[in-house]
Every structure is written in C-alpha cells, then in structure tokens.
Image (cartoon, rainbow, N blue to C red):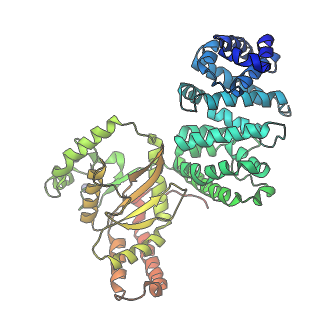
Amino acid sequence: MKLIIDFQGNSATASLVSETPGVRAVIARAWGVYLNDERNVDEPGVADAIQFINRDTQSGHPPNIHEYTEGVGGLDRFAVCVLYHIDRVLRRPHGYPVSNTTVFLLKGLLRLLVESDDGQGPLATALLTSGIIGTITLVLCSFDASTLEGADDVRKRCFNLLTRRFDLSPSYPSLAESFKSNLVHAITTCAQNDLRMDDFLRTLLQRVLPRSLISHTVLSAIDRPVDKDTVLLFPQPDPFRDSELFQLWDRFNKTALRNVRILQAYNKAVSTSVLGCDNMKCEQIRRKNELMRCSSCRAIYYCSTACQALDWYEDGHRDVCSHLRNLRLEFAAEPETLSTRDRSFLHALVHYDYERTLRRSCVDKIGFIRQNPGEQFYLLFDYTRGFERPQVRPVGSPPDPNPSEGSATQWADQIARAARSGGRLNLVVVLVADGEHISRRMVPVRSPTSALHDGLSQIAGRITSGADLAAFTPRIMEDVSSLLRERKERGDHRPVWQRLVVPE
Ligand SMILES: [Zn+2]
Ligand SMILES: [Zn+2]
C-alpha cells in the first residue's frame, strides 16, 4: 500500500495509478480489513488508505466509487463499515482530543461520500439507510470548536451535506436522527465559533427546522436528554446572544419548547380523537370508536343509522359517496408521507392552536363577515415556518385545494357540510411540509352548538356599515370575550376536544 501511495505522490505517475484497473479495489480491500477490526482505531493502515482516497479525489479524476465499494464487499457493507468506523473514532472516551489524523480521515471520507455521486446515487441511499445523518451530526459536535487545520473544512462539508439533504427531502425520521445526535449542540456552538457557517445555519434555522416541529417523531427526539447531563433545549451560552443568528435560534427554540409541551400533554391525554356526527342536523360529538363509519367511502361518521339515512337521502351523501370512495382507493395507492402518529398529533396540535388563538380569530371572523356577508370562509394554519397566527380566508381563495386536485371532492363535501351546519363545522386548512412539497390538509373543527357562530354574526351585524372597523375593535373584543365566557360556561368547547392541559 505504501508503494502505491508513493507512486501517487509523484504527479507523473499519479494519473497512471488512478487509471490502473483494480488499484482502488486493492486499497479498499486492505482498508476493509482494518475497518473491520475492533482494535484498529488509529492504525496507520487506515490513515494510508485515507491518504490514497484523499489524493485520488483531489487528482481531478472522478473517483470510481464502485471499485472502492466492491473492494470492501458491496455498497451496503461499505456504508456500514465507514459509518461504524467514524462513530468509533468519535465516541472515544471523553477528553481524547480530535487529532490531525481524524481530521484527515474525515476530510477524505466526506469528499468521497459527498462528491462521488452528488449525494443522489445508490451510495447515498446506502449511507442514509445506515444512519449517515446521525454520524454527520456527531462529527459536527466533535468538531464544533476545533481549531485544527482542516476542521473548518470538515464542518463546512458536514453542514453542507445536512442542509442539502434536509432541503431536498426533509424526511422527519432523518431529522429526528440528527436531533438525537445533538444537532442543537452543533448549531449553537458553530454559531459562536465559526462565522463561515452562517449561511448553512440560517437555512436550517429559518426554513428546515421550524417546519419539522409539527412531527411527533421529531418532537420526541427533541424531548429527550442526550445523556444524563445534557438536555437538548435551551443551551443559550452568552457569546451566542451577540450573533445575528440568535433571533432565528430563539424563535426556533421557543416554538420547539412550546410544541414539546403540547407533545407531552398529547402523550398523556387519554383520548384525543373526537369527531362530530356527519349528519349536520345532529349535535353528537363522540370519540371516534363510538361512531359508525360509512362502509363505502369510509370518510364519513354517524352516531346512528337514523343519522346515516337522513344524510344519505336528504343531505345528498348518496351523490358524493362514490367520489369519496374512489378518492380513498386512489390515495391508498400513494404512500402517505406522514406517519399515523404524526397525523394524529397534527390534529391535536391544530385543535390546541385553534382554542389558543380563538379570541383573535373571532375578531378576524367578525371583520370578514361584515365585509362579505353570507360568504363562507376557512381558517388557514400555516406550519411551514413554525407557528403563525391563523388567517381567515374566503372559500375559493388559495391555498384551498383547487378543483384539479384529487382532494377537491372531499373539500367540496366539507364546504357543503359547513354550510348546512350553521357554524358548527369550522373549515380549517393546514399547511405542512411534506417531503419536498408543501401539503394542504383539512382538519375540520366541530362545536356542539352554533352559539358562537351566531354570536359573531350578530356582533358583525351591529356594526354600522361604512364605519371604521378599527374604532370598534375594543368594543368587539369585549363582546367576543363575553361570548367565549358563555361558551366556557355552557361547556361547548369540552366535548370537541379532550382539552390538552399544557403548562405555560
Ligand atoms: Zn359514504
Ligand atoms: Zn347523529
């Protein structure tokens, strides 16, 4: 191996070496033997192989990744070996400093991993399945404040790899993997120590991380101490406060903490899934398992066969049932990107936020009703940048589902039901990041009576037309407050949602 590396060191023979068939396989085989041996953490053999790889990737010839992987025993074996080795180097007993050899090793590996197939090919897939996201985060944590030559290069490559991966396909399990390996620590320390990371950190804190905070999987990973001394949230060392990234960090941190508390309450709640009978003349709201489901479309629930008959014959479910059924079959073929648990938690989150922001959205609804009497509206919850105040939008305005989409039938059915419900069914559209897309989901919120809706319409009616709405705001707030007090006394909000008790 020494001989090959010596040849490589001479520029005249270097390209000859790179073009010699099988030379990489030989290196890889030798290297595989070292990597597979428990005792060989810092063996010169590993360093030699890495040196070869480093020169090979710098030589201008694209490295032939297949030769390397075949030498170790296939793509998957290669991925497992490399990651296992890095983990082993990095998890050495506390206090063991990151050495120049480690930097050298990681530089070579990252170049090979990231640049050889542009993070898209079969190697990238094998690495992802083997847990490279966790390993890369671990590398970042070990190199957070290292001033060794080349350490900043390693940091940069790691952040580049993470942001690109999360931006391309922000899968919740891989984000969770990164949080478990203490991504938060890597971010806060790099923000203090290395200004060149600002662009990556900004992308992570502004776009990638906040939108993942709706996921049960991600929040569970955040709500978990890394070890007995380290808790993920709230590491706010003073020097970081001066960084211009601090505001972004602070906003992310607050949303994360808020949603973790909701998660904890959600995990403790006995029953969370509560639905209303879909006969809009019926006021029953029960747990999902206490309702009967339409056996054909499986999208609609009733409290009794009488309610089903009424909805079928009088309210037109027979006209939409088969559409809804086809829709279900169509969607069954497509994989759902959010796990069942993520979807269930999203419902809880929306219901919680609906209640929490109710006073403000009631005032907005009054403004809408006054300006557009008789028009239907929906509430928009946008979770793509963390949490934002819900907005009142007229039905038919973006981003409600457009007619060319499959979900339009379902949405149209919800709109018709909301119109019949006299304010007991509130239309809610939720925007969430879903893989690389932004997806729209419907999370209707039900009330057992229409008292609140009627009250809002009355308040809107009392405001003289042409009057300046702003001048009425204090009065409107007062009226809304008394409506909400009455609602609480009636217990209207209780059956809709087994309220999550979230400590402030
Ligand atoms: Zn049906
Ligand atoms: Zn009913």
Q: The C terminus is located in which quarter?
A: bottom right
Q: Residue furthest front?
A: 12
As drawn, is 455 to the left or to the right of 184? left
Q: Is residue 416 above or below residue 18?
A: below
Q: Quadrant of residue 452?
A: bottom left
Residue at x-position 57% and y-position 39% = 165
Q: At which x and y percent is residue 266? A: 52, 50
Q: Is residue 273 above or below residue 466?
A: above
Q: The N terminus is located in which quarter?
A: top right
- Near-viewer residue (284 or 220): 220
- Near-viewer residue (217 or 400): 400
Q: At which x and y percent is residue 313? A: 13, 54
Q: Quadrant of residue 70?
A: top right
- Near-viewer residue (394 or 306): 394
Q: Is residue 30 visible to the viewer in this orientation of the structure? A: yes
As drawn, is 270 to the left or to the right of 454? right
Q: Is residue 38 visible to the viewer in this orientation of the structure? A: no
Q: At which x and y percent is residue 198? A: 70, 51
**How many callouts does the rendering have?**
0
Residue at x-position 66% and y-position 27% = 112
Q: Is residue 465 above or below residue 233?
A: below
Q: At which x and y percent is residue 498? A: 45, 56
Residue at x-position 56% and y-position 50% = 213
As drawn, is 413 to the left or to the right of 145? left
As drawn, is 316 to the left or to the right of 249? left
